[in-house]
């Protein structure tokens, strides 16, 4: 927003093109999730929330690392600090929908189904793969060219 209170486009054409290239990758990622047999998530419809999840999780992870820097890892319940961080992210997204409700939400809700929010952002973070010793080619590890980092 400009000092006049009006919205103004301050992006250069190159900025807009670069951002679009990144968001297109995120749209493609979520378009690939099948929510109900034969019904896919609409990555364009859910894009704003998917960007927010990706950026928010990355910032929260960086903040956790900064806040705990130099402190020993307590390895609570046989999980490292990083593992607990990502497990708690997934716990937030526990939710069930009937297939009928899910089909409606796929066309009307700007939020991806919870189970895909649980895996979408972390699968783009090398810190997740490192925390759980994931190897290239495993489901939660995106190839370098498909990994999405927007902010």
Image: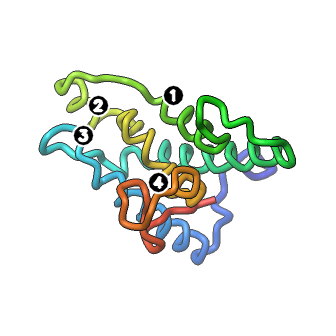
Q: Quadrant of residue 96?
A: top left
Distance CA(mark 3)–CA(mark 4): 17 Å
| Image point (43%, 60%), residue name | 141
Q: Residue furthest left?
A: 38
Q: Secondary structure at mark 3?
A: strand
Task: Locate residue 13, reporting x and y percent.
Answer: 58, 75
Distance CA(mark 2)–CA(mark 1): 19 Å
Identify residue for label 4: 123
Residue 92's mark? 1
Residue 35's mark? 3
Q: Secondary structure at mark 1?
A: helix
* Nearer-N-terminus badge (1/3): 3
Q: Badge 1: how crowded within 10 Å, few (<14), some, or many (20+)?
A: few
Distance CA(mark 3)–CA(mark 2): 10 Å
Identify residue for label 2: 105
Between tags 1 and 3, which lies in front? 1
């Amino acid at each position: 927003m400009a000092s006049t209170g009006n919205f103004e486009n301050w992006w250069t054409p190159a900025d807009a093109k670069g951002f679009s290239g990144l968001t297109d990758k995120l749209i493609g990622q979520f378009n690939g999730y099948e929510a109900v047999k034969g019904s896919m998530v609409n990555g364009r419809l859910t894009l704003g929330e998917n960007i927010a999840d990706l950026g928010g999780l990355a910032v929260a992870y960086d903040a956790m690392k900064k806040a705990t820097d130099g402190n020993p890892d307590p390895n609570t319940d046989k999980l490292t600090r990083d593992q607990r961080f990502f497990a708690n992210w997934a716990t937030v997204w526990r939710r069930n929908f009937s297939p009928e409700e899910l089909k409606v939400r796929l066309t009307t809700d700007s939020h991806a189904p919870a189970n895909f929010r649980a895996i979408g952002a972390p699968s783009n973070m090398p810190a997740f793969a490192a925390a759980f010793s994931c190897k290239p080619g495993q489901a939660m590890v995106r190839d370098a060219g498909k990994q999405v980092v927007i902010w």
